[in-house]
Amino acid sequence: MKTVVAGALGECVHVAGVSNFLHLAEMAGWRTVFLGPAVPIDRFIQAAKDEKADLIGVSYRLTPETGERLLGEFAEAASELHDQGVRFAFGGTPPVAAKAQKLGAFFEACFDGSQPPDEILAYLRGEGSQPASVDRYPQTTVERIQWKAPFPLLRHHFGLPSMEATLKGIQQISEAKALDVISLGIDQDAQENFFHPERQNPRARGAGGVPVRSAADYQALYEASRCGNFPLMRTYSGTDDFIALAELYLQTIHNAWCAIPLFWFNQMDGRGPIALEESIREHQQVMAWYGSRGVPVELNEPHHWGMRDAPDVVYVTSAFLAAWNAKAFGVRDYIAQMMFNSPAGLSDAMDLAKMAAILEMIAPLEDDRFRIWRQTRTGLLSYPLEDNAARAHLAASIYLQMGLKPHIVHIVGHTEADHAATAEDVINASQMARRVIATALQGQPDLLADPAIQQRKAHLIAEARLTLTAIRSLSHAEDPLTDPAALAEAVRCGILDAPQLKNNRFAAGTIRTGIVRGGCEALDEQGEVLPESARLANYL
């Protein structure tokens, strides 16, 4: 085990940065020795010799001119250690860090507070000394998750109504090293009518995202990301011509993972031209296509129910169905997406309990052929309009999400209620998220230990198992939970239902829901909580 010795030099007593540096060093597997504040030069040198230090971390946060003189004296006194191969790193305010850099190659790294914790961690793992290149940053999802741990990957949606603005923004985001994954937001015609120019509506160009119209457009967007920290890129799976789009995405943007629903993006929600049952069948084929190529798959399924005010038990059931189908159709790396604040009135405790129920239900599916990666995000419809309130909501939501130890945090920008995020908005949201995540990783309380959360989790699991039993009763197929006819029928007859599906020809739309003690519940005609045993009595 290598040893790092660190402290604040001379008369400087500010050691919070030193402590953070050593905490990250421990994460990276170093043995750490903290020398404390106001360490004289000779004590620094002696401690390094006594501890047989491989790396010496020096901090100074006072006057730059004094720091420059003191660091010069330190470098001269430590020259013998430097010649013997001991490494030196500096941390301080930007003006002092600039003085440290003037010492040439003595300090192999200078940190001025602008570097995110994961970048410092990469340095301590021996990766930070490499120049910025595609070889330094893993270019597949799973490799990047493992490389960045314990910090989660950061993902944000980005796509502006013009190619020019989106190209410029992607480059800006990449150079700022703001994200690990750029989720390319494309307009509705690109999702539905890419291969059908005759169906495209010129007046709707750019509606909902960047108007990509050719393979060259996709390639240009990907090339714009080839700088900074070389983020991965991914985009929607579309709502028609699924396999043709999948082939295009892999060839042009090296799609980091597929995201597709089970029940949505079709005639039922107006997002695509295909009827419900047939779309379920085609979505299963898309899962199998990506799974056979070793590309991770995310089913962005449950939050579509939550955003339509479905009860928590339907949310949990749909999340289980998503994972079950992913495994059944050959997905090897499954990204379990959990959107918080859906519906927006949930309490934090009940929201967390719902997600914990999902994770406990799908955990038994995991084996050497099916790995589950946790992805969390803030509710799309939950942001307040006022900017300061929106920023606070982003931070509070991500801190709650960290209770699930996510592998990926999908940042939903604080500007969501007002406008589509610009590159500056994305970078700002990323900075807020990084700070929250670093704080949580320093020692967040075990939020799941709350007895109320555990009780709600157990209740939702028991209820969801009844819902699954009801769905199985609809089919004599070998596996009713993957039978498109049974799944479509579950929606039509109201086993899976949401209030906002009222008057939808594919769904019942008869369920009533409300927020009760922080959770979203099905209600009877008197407004009382309606358990699944009563709601689904005809199927049980």
Image: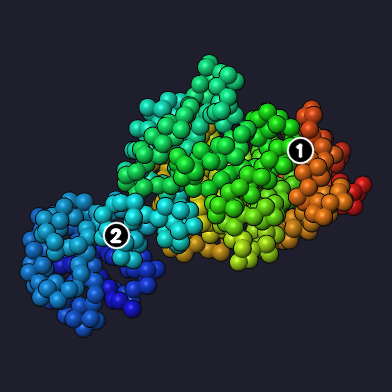
Report the residue that reaches farthest toward the bottom. Answer: 50
Local secondary structure at mark 1: helix
Q: What residue is rendered at 59% in x and 61% in y?
A: 371
Residue tagged 1: 277
Residue 190 to residue 95: above or below: above
Task: Pick the residue in front: 6 or 183.
Answer: 183
Task: Pick the residue in front: 13 or 308.
Answer: 308
Report the residue that reaches farthest toward the top. Answer: 203
Report the residue that reaches farthest toward the right. Answer: 538
Is residue 266 shown to the viewer in this render?
yes
Q: Disc 2 versus disc 1: distance between alpha carbons?
A: 50 Å
Query: Where's residue 100, x and y in %?
Result: 15, 58
Residue 376 to residue 380: above or below: below
Q: What residue is rendered at 34% in x and 73% in y?
A: 30
Judge left or right: residue 505 versus residue 433. right
Q: Which mark is residue 128?
A: 2
Q: Amino acid at mark 1?
A: Glu
Query: Where's residue 219, x and y in %?
Result: 41, 36
User: How is the protein colored in the picture?
Assistant: rainbow
Front position among marks 2 and 1: 1
Ranked by sequence position, the earlier of labels 2 and 1 is: 2
Q: What residue is rendered at 47% in x and 64% in y?
A: 443
Task: Pick the residue in front: 34 or 329.
Answer: 329
When asked about the image quadrant of residue 60, the answer is bottom left
Query: Where's residue 276, x and y in %?
Result: 74, 35
Is residue 70 shown to the viewer in this render?
no
Q: Are marks 2 and 1 in contact (CB under 8 Å)?
A: no
The number of discs equals: 2
Tag 2: Cα neighbours inside 10 Å, few (<14), some, or many (≥20)? some
In the rendered image, which quarter contains the N terminus? bottom left
Q: Amino acid at mark 2?
A: Gly
